[in-house]
Every structure is written in structure tokens, then in C-alpha cells.
């Protein structure tokens, strides 16, 4: 993978820290609902507000989801303890965060990306989320606001922080990693993976070096709220660091904020970074040691991960998939639509067609996909494969099928999409041949490129009713007739 | 208060005396005596009387309000009470009313007890004299110029002065037992995890336990049975059922092996040491096998305690930042507001311990201080474990001295810290311990003898305490 724009002789070294909000029913240490978007400060209690005298009690479902993530990332799931990370911040009710420090629940692991590259996982530990501060008035940024409002609904929401090794070498690979991790988090049931709601938040540690040299100084980039900002921010940051180094300056280790509007990373005041978190074991919680029975249960309950699901779809295609088909496989798995493809194939539909229609038309109305009847989808695909509907007609029928349901053949009839009779088709082809003598000559001489042109002319003339394959067959028949 | 908690409850349950009458007597005594003693920071007269009427109605309708029916109880002001100010005797919690009750408060109420007030304490339970309170010191009912001990000094004084038969305190390094000893009452710290800490404003989470202060061992036993037992809201709460201690009080110590701990007697005042040895002899006379034993690890307990407790406190007290509740001193930005609020809101001893604890946890010092103190803590537990291979229970002084004069140690924090030297080992190990009044010094001030037992050894502990109580010299000297 290479990034356009990266100067030759330079390499990127990237590690990602992904915070994943766990899709638990309640918060990590109390019974408050874990939901997004409610009125501020409505899902709070003495525990998640850190009121004096309150005590945390660990949520079993959160531990289970963390173990599922660990198992999916092939981590070692081990006995762990919680620590307190001490620092003052208004949206952190206790002024310390309960997190895991030197004894995390998931240690080591690996994530294989769709292109076959592997990123090692250092750890995936459990911690609590903070509240949310909104700066009001003035510039709206932390330094220039008039006042701040704090919403503690998010305080105490369970997170798993997944820390990768610095194995990532490009913005594109970082994006692929984040995308694959997202699919895994969704597949494990640990998260809904919604970046726009903050369910998945990514921080990137970026450094650059000249090929063959040791590691450079890294900067941590925060506020990456989408895959797009992740890619752009890494690209910008690498360019910034290279420019500094090429000018003979040095990179200062610091935390930088991605400004999506300006398209650049900005230094956060580094004075605030000189924090000594004074980690020490959380005395209000007991050590967490999931027994082997529980661990085995979790491992056994995991469904197939995205990589295995992609392999299964490729196997369904048979033979070597084309690059376009590989993209279709990825997108079908990413949209969680593999079942649509496989169930159509089980009912006799050809795999390449089922894959293409699912990756494109079905995925485009993803919210309706769950209601798509596999039997009827398969019937439609067979109509198209058998030449009774053209590709264009099949897509129209599919759109209707997704919206209203019904029998594909009846939909086609009611839309007036009867397949063209053989005579009508032969007539249409003959007319196009007669109207395009120069192209016909080339075609006769063996120029395959004009076959597409001629077919397109037939399609245009028939308003898309003609079946592409049947047109090609008719053209071939006319050619062999003319050449004998 | 005339009558033990058990006797009062029995009268109320049988309908011989109304709870209202009992509560009115307690309130009258408080009104008469507390302006001088200052055991209470808040007296809840109206609520207590309303609750007494409820109890009386329950009795009249034939239902049993519970083993502490109608018993007036005082709560240390670090126990959360719904809708009632809970200040920890700190300015920083001015005006804060918790929205919930501590588990122990719920359980006391469910047993029919009536909360009559919140008691004075050293700010956030940091101190041994109840002088570190934003509302001023509490006086020892036996000598008004002397301290009641601390940090549960208000609770101890309330019982010693006869205002209430029963109070709750919290014990992190001796904060129940030490004031009980100095005030001549019974004070008991349970095994760590036996009583839920939910609703106890934390000082040092791994050491804190709530326990009873009372005029008699039997009253302490009844109270422990009421407040003990698993609570799902406290992760460190043990699954074990409440210990069976009421039956143990009169069991006696015949044939029990009791170790008199050298380190808990050899550096105490001669009058105190003499009483402890007298207690040992009394136990022997009651049929116990008493032998002296040295647990040298105890010498390092105090130093370890004064690293671990402040370290945890520095983190526990971070939340008092002016953002959400209590005092706020305005300033141009959040960080400055935090500093201004904490500067104005915390007293000098609390600040000292926050600084000590912050230092002990700092990068570069953690191993030398906090981690090493935790290893010493393990050594203290090892010392206990070895002693308990030979003994069923242990005996020593509760405090090195009897009550000292108000102001005597306020300028010398280390001298004050030494007050805890006999009590911290039980906290470090998480074991139960009790202080039982055992005569007085030559000046007539109460002396407390401390009994100790292994983890979950509460029945043994109460058998020992009962025997000590029966053998104790008649209280003499200056009566309150």
C-alpha cells in the first residue's frame, strides 16, 4: 500500500488506539442505561456521578463483550485488575478514571487485513468513558469559551481500548485496519461501530523516518471522527513531519488535534500533557479472573469473523475472483449481507450474479435488506440469468421487490417488462447493423471492441428490454453467417 | 441514656415504653449537654420523633419493628443520609445533601433504630482527636478539657455522655477503637468486607470499615448483626452471612489461647500497660491460657499505614473539585477554580495527607513508598498469621495513652499519628478488633483494652470482649 504524495525515501510508522463503546444494556459500574442521545444528565446515579460514598460494581456483560473482542483478535484472555488513572477534568466525575493498566484482560493478538497484511494487537483493555463537555460562547474552543456545560450520561459507559502495535505503514492501511476492526466489533456484538455517534473513536500515533533508520518522534492525533478524517489526518501529519525534518527541524512529541474544517492537525497545549497519572490498583474493585469455563463459553459463542466470511463468499464464487468481485465480497461482508448472497445461491441463483446484485442494489437500500425474501430474490436472479429479464429490467424489479415485496415475475409483468421475443430481438439487431455499416465492418474483421458499441446501440433502441447476452449471441450468429 | 440498646428495644417492642418517650429523653439530654460537649453537628429532632411515632404505631398494630426498635442512634457525619447534610466535618461539603442512604443506615432503619443526629469527626476521618473539624472540637465527657479521640470522636462522646446508647463510626486506622478507649465505651471494627462501605464517604478504601460504638459489648454485638452481611453495591463486601456474635458474648474464654502482644503494650503509658496486664490476668482467671507473644512486624505498621492511607485518600478526595456539589470558589478558569475551592475547603491535616499521598504515588517514588508500604502490609498480615497458629485471640492496649488535652498535639502531627500505633495493624490485615473499657488511669481517665481475632473471627472476638467486660474494674474516678 502506498500513499500518493508521500515523499520517496520516507516511511510512516503508525499505531492506532481505538476506543470502542460496548453495546451493554447498562453502564460499566452502575445500573444506569447505556444509551446515546438522551436528554443531558438523565441517565445518571450516585455511582456514575462519583458522589461521595458511592462504589463501583463491575458489569458482567461488559466483561463478556471485552472477552469476545479479545477472542476475536486472538488475544490471550487473562486475569486482570483495575487501576485508577488520576487527573483532574470536569467531565470525569471522580477526577480519576477506572482503567486497566499493567494487567489488562486481553494481551497480545493479531488482526489480518483484507489484503493479507497483519497488524499485531498489543492489548485490549476495559475502562470507563468520561462525560461530555460542551464549551459555550466566545470561540467555543476550550481556551476561549465563556462557560462549559457537562453531560454525564456518557460517564461510566464501558469502553474497550484496542491498542495496535506500530505496524501500520500508510494512511490507507490505517483505514483498512480501522474498517476491519469495526467489522469485527460489530460481528462480535460488542459494538454498533457507529463512528458518527462516538461508538468507535480512533487516536493515531504517527511518526516518520527515512527508510532504514530508527523510529522517529511520534505525535498522537485526536478527534478522528470518521474514516475520512483518519486518512486525511495521517496524510497531513506525515507531510508536516517530513517537511519539518527536511528543513532541519525536529518533531516535538505532543498530542495534536485534527481540525476537519481546516484539514490540518493543531498542537494542543503541551503544558497540559505533563500529567503524572499516579496509577495505583483500584481498591474498590476485586481482581477479575474469568474462569476457563467462561472463557471457553465465550470463544465457542463467537460466530465467524469477517475474514472467514469473506473466504466463504470467495469459495462460493469458485475459481479466481476478479478485483471487482473482491471489492463486492468486502462490501457485502462489511454491510453484514453475506446471508443474502448465500441463501440466494442455496436456491440455485448463480453466485457471481447474487454477489453483484447484493453488493450494489441490495446494499444501496440496506435498511430494507433484512425484509428481502431469499426465495423471491433467488427467483429474480434466475430470471435474469435465464435471459428472461435484462440486467436493467432485473434491477428495476429488484428495486420494487425491496420496497413492496411480491413475486418477481408478476412485478416484471405489471411493469411491462416482458422479455423480448427472439424475432423482435433479431429485428432490432439487424436494424442497428444496417445503421452502423463502418462499425459492422470492423466487427466482421474481428475487432471485439466494437461489439460493446453495437450492443449498446441495440439496448438504446430497445429501451433496455433486450438481454445483453442474447444480443451478443445474435451478433455472433450474424458474423459467422456473413463470414461463411 | 438510661438502659442499654437491647433493654430499650425490648421495652419498646413489648409496648412497655413508647419510642417517642425514648427519643424525647435522648433529645432532651442532647439539648442539655451537647452545647458543651459538641458531639453532634446536626440533630434531627423532628425526623426522629416522626420515626418514633411510626415505630409506636407499628408496635400498636402488632408488628415487630426489629431488634433495635426505638433505639436512638447517632451516625458519624461521613455516613450518607438521604436529604440530610453529610459534611465529613469539612467546609468543602457545605450544603451537600446526599440523594441516598448508606447501606448501614438502611439496615439500622429496617431494624427499627432511630437516627437522632450526625456526629462530629476529624475532617474526612483524618485525625485522632476530633480537633480537625470545621465546626470545632468535641470535648471528652470525662474531662471537658481533653479530646474524645478520633476520628469518630463525636460518636464516642455521644455514647459516653449518655446522649444515645448507640452510634456508628468508621475505622481506617483506629478511628472507632481509639475514641472508644479515650471515652470509656465499647468500639468495634469488623473484618474488612463484613459491613458494606456503600454510602461511607471514603478516606482509604482498602482500610475503611464501619462499626458500632456502644455502652456495652452486647449492644455492639446486636448492632453488628444488624449492619453486617453481603451488599451487592460494595464489590469488597464478603459473601459470608452476618456473623453470629450475640450468642458469643456470654460464651466465655475457658480453654482459649490468648496472646498478649508485646508490641501492643511495651510502649504504652505505665498506667495503660498495667491495666492491659490486669486484663490478661483476669482472662487467665476466667480459664484462658494467656501467654505473651512478640509480633515484631507491628513496629512498621504505622509507617506503612501513613503511606497507604494518604495515597488512597489523595485519589478519593480528588472529586471534591467544586464542579458538581459542595463548596465552589469562583475563579477565571476551571483549573483555578479547582485550586481555589480546594484551598478554601480543606483543612490543614487533609491538605497534608493529600500531599503525602500524591507524593507517595508519584512517578519515580511509587516503588520506594507506596509499593514498599504494601509489602510491609503483607508482612504485618504474615505476623498475624503466625501468631494465630498459636492463639485464638490477641490482647493489647487500644491506645498508648489515655485522653490528652485539647490542643496538646495539634502542632505536632507525628505525635498525633502515634496515637494510632496500636490500632493500625488490624486495619492493615483487615482483621476484626474491639476496644473494651477496662478501668481508668490514676487520674481517673478511661483505659481501653483491645482484643483482636483473625479474619471473620468475630464470634471469638465477642467472646473475648464479653469476658473482658465482665472482668473490668467498676468505672471509677471522674464520671461524666
Image (tube, rainbow, N blue to C red):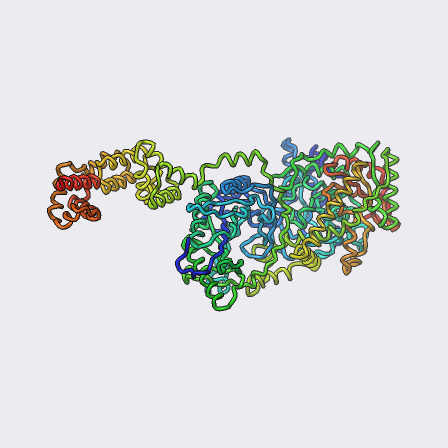
- Residue extending furthest toward the front: A484
Give the answer, above or below, for where B476 lies relative to A239: above
Q: Is A330 on the left-hand or right-hand side of B339?
A: left
Residue A316 location in percent, x, y?
36, 36
Quarter holding the C terminus of chain A is top left
The quarter holding residue A357 reads top left
**Residue B211 visible, this orientation:** yes
Q: Residue at x 15, y 36 (%)?
A: A421
Whether residue A159 is visible to the viewer of this picture, yes or no, is: no
Give the percent coordinates (x, y) of residue A35.
Answer: 47, 45
Q: Nearer the viewer, residue B259 or B368?
A: B368
Q: Quadrant of residue B454?
A: top right
Left or right: A170 as drawn, with respect to B327: left
Q: Against A256, is B302 above or below?
A: above
Q: How many marks?
A: 0
Measured from the top left, where is residue A456 in percent x and y? Answer: 19, 47
Residue B141 placed where, x, y %?
Answer: 79, 50
Amino acid at each position: 500500500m502506498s500513499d500518493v504524495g508521500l515523499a520517496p525515501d520516507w516511511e510512516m510508522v503508525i499505531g492506532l488506539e481505538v476506543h470502542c463503546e460496548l453495546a451493554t444494556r447498562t453502564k460499566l459500574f452502575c445500573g444506569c442505561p447505556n444509551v446515546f442521545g438522551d436528554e443531558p444528565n438523565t441517565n445518571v446515579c450516585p455511582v456514575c456521578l462519583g458522589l461521595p460514598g458511592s462504589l463501583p460494581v463491575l458489569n458482567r456483560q461488559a466483561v463478556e463483550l471485552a472477552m469476545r473482542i479479545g477472542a476475536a483478535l486472538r488475544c490471550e484472555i487473562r486475569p486482570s485488575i483495575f487501576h485508577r488513572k488520576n487527573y483532574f477534568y470536569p467531565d470525569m466525575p471522580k477526577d480519576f478514571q477506572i482503567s486497566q493498566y499493567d494487567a489488562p484482560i486481553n494481551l497480545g493478538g493479531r488482526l489480518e487485513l483484507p489484503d493479507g497484511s497483519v497488524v499485531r494487537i498489543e492489548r485490549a483493555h476495559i475502562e470507563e468513558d468520561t462525560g461530555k463537555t460542551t464549551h459555550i460562547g466566545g470561540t467555543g474552543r476550550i481556551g476561549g469559551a465563556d462557560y462549559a456545560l457537562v453531560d454525564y450520561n456518557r460517564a461510566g459507559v464501558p469502553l474497550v481500548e484496542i491498542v495496535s502495535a506500530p505496524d501500520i505503514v500508510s494512511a490507507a492501511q490505517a483505514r483498512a485496519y480501522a474498517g476491519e476492526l469495526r467489522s469485527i466489533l460489530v460481528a462480535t456484538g460488542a459494538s454498533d461501530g457507529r463512528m458518527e455517534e462516538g461508538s468507535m473513536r480512533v487516536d493515531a500515533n504517527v511518526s516518520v523516518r527515512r527508510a532504514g533508520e530508527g523510529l522517529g518522534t511520534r505525535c498522537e492525533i485526536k478527534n478522528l471522527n470518521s474514516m475520512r478524517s483518519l486518512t486525511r489526518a495521517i496524510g497531513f501529519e506525515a507531510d508536516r513531519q517530513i517537511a519539518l525534518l527536511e528543513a532541519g527541524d525536529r518533531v516535538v512529541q505532543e498530542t495534536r488535534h485534527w481540525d476537519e474544517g481546516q484539514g490540518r492537525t493543531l498542537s494542543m497545549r503541551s503544558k497540559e500533557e505533563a500529567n503524572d497519572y499516579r496509577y495505583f490498583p483500584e481498591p474498590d474493585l476485586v481482581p477479575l479472573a474469568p474462569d476457563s469455563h467462561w472463557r471457553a463459553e465465550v470463544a465457542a459463542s463467537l460466530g465467524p469473523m469477517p475474514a472467514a466470511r469473506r473466504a466463504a463468499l470467495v469459495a462460493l464464487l469458485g475459481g479466481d475472483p476478479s478485483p471487482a468481485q473482491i471489492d463486492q465480497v468486502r462490501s457485502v461482508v462489511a454491510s453484514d449481507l453475506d446471508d443474502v448472497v448465500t441463501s440466494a445461491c442455496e436456491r440455485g441463483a448463480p453466485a457471481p450474479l447474487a454477489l453483484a446484485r447484493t453488493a450494489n442494489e441490495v446494499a444501496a437500500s440496506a435498511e430494507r435488506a433484512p425484509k428481502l425474501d431469499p426465495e423471491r430474490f433467488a427467483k429474480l436472479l434466475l430470471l435474469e440469468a435465464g435471459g428472461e429479464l435484462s440486467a436493467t429490467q432485473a434491477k428495476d424489479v429488484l428495486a420494487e421487490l425491496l420496497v413492496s415485496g411480491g413475486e418477481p415475475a408478476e412485478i416484471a409483468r405489471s411493469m411491462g417488462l416482458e422479455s423480448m421475443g427472439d424475432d423482435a430481438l433479431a429485428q432490432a439487431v439487424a436494424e442497428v447493423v444496417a445503421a452502423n455499416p463502418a462499425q459492422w465492418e470492423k466487427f466482421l474483421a474481428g475487432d471485439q471492441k466494437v461489439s460493446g458499441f453495437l450492443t449498446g446501440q441495440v439496448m438504446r433502441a430497445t429501451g433496455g428490454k433486450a438481454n445483453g447476452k442474447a444480443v451478443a449471441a445474435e451478433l455472433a450468429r450474424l458474423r459467422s453467417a456473413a463470414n461463411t | 441514656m438510661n438502659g442499654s440498646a437491647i433493654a430499650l428495644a425490648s421495652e419498646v417492642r413489648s409496648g412497655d415504653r413508647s419510642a417517642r418517650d425514648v427519643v424525647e429523653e435522648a433529645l432532651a439530654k442532647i439539648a442539655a449537654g451537647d452545647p458543651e460537649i459538641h458531639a453532634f453537628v446536626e440533630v434531627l429532632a423532628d425526623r426522629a420523633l416522626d420515626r418514633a411515632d411510626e415505630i409506636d404505631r407499628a408496635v400498636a398494630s402488632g408488628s415487630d419493628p426489629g431488634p433495635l426498635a426505638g433505639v436512638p442512634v447517632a451516625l458519624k457525619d461521613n455516613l450518607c443520609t438521604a436529604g440530610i447534610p453529610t459534611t465529613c466535618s469539612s467546609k468543602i461539603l457545605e450544603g451537600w445533601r446526599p440523594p441516598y442512604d448508606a447501606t448501614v443506615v438502611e439496615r439500622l432503619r429496617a431494624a427499627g433504630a432511630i437516627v437522632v443526629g450526625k456526629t462530629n469527626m476529624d475532617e474526612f476521618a483524618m485525625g485522632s482527636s476530633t480537633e480537625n473539624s470545621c465546626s470545632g472540637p468535641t470535648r471528652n465527657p470525662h474531662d471537658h478539657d481533653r479530646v474524645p479521640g478520633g476520628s469518630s470522636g463525636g460518636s464516642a462522646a455521644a455514647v459516653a455522655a449518655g446522649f444515645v446508647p448507640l452510634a456508628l463510626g468508621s475505622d481506617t486506622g483506629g478511628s472507632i477503637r481509639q475514641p472508644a478507649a479515650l471515652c470509656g465505651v465499647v468500639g468495634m471494627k469488623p473484618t474488612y468486607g463484613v459491613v458494606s462501605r456503600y454510602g461511607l464517604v471514603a478516606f482509604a478504601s482498602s482500610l475503611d470499615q464501619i462499626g458500632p460504638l456502644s455502652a456495652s459489648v452486647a449492644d455492639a454485638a446486636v448492632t453488628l448483626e444488624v449492619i453486617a452481611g453481603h451488599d451487592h453495591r460494595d464489590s469488597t463486601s464478603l459473601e459470608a452471612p452476618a456473623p453470629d456474635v450475640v450468642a458469643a458474648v456470654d460464651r466465655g474464654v475457658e480453654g482459649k489461647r490468648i496472646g498478649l502482644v508485646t508490641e501492643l503494650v511495651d510502649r504504652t503509658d505505665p498506667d495503660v500497660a498495667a491495666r492491659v496486664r490486669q486484663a490478661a490476668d483476669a482472662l487467665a482467671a476466667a480459664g484462658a491460657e494467656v501467654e505473651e507473644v512478640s509480633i515484631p512486624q507491628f513496629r512498621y505498621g504505622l509507617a506503612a499505614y501513613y503511606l497507604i492511607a494518604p495515597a488512597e485518600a489523595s485519589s478519593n478526595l480528588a472529586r471534591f473539585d467544586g464542579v458538581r456539589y459542595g463548596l465552589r470558589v469562583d475563579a477565571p478558569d476551571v483549573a483555578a477554580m479547582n485550586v481555589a475551592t480546594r484551598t478554601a475547603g480543606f483543612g490543614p491535616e487533609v491538605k497534608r495527607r493529600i500531599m503525602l499521598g500524591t507524593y507517595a504515588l508519584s512517578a519515580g517514588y511509587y516503588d520506594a513508598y507506596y509499593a514498599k508500604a504494601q509489602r510491609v502490609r503483607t508482612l504485618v498480615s504474615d505476623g498475624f498469621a503466625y501468631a494465630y497458629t498459636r492463639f485464638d485471640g490477641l490482647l493489647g492496649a487500644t491506645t498508648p495513652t489515655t485522653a490528652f488535652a485539647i490542643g496538646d498535639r495539634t502542632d505536632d502531627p507525628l505525635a498525633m499519628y502515634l496515637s494510632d500505633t496500636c490500632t493500625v495493624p488490624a486495619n492493615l490485615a483487615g482483621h476484626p478488633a474491639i476496644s473494651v473499657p477496662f478501668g481508668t488511669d490514676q487520674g481517673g481517665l478511661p483505659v481501653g483494652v483491645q482484643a483482636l481475632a483473625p479474619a471473620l473471627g468475630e464470634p471469638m472476638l465477642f467472646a473475648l470482649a464479653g469476658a473482658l467486660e465482665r472482668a473490668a474494674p467498676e468505672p471509677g474516678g471522674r464520671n461524666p
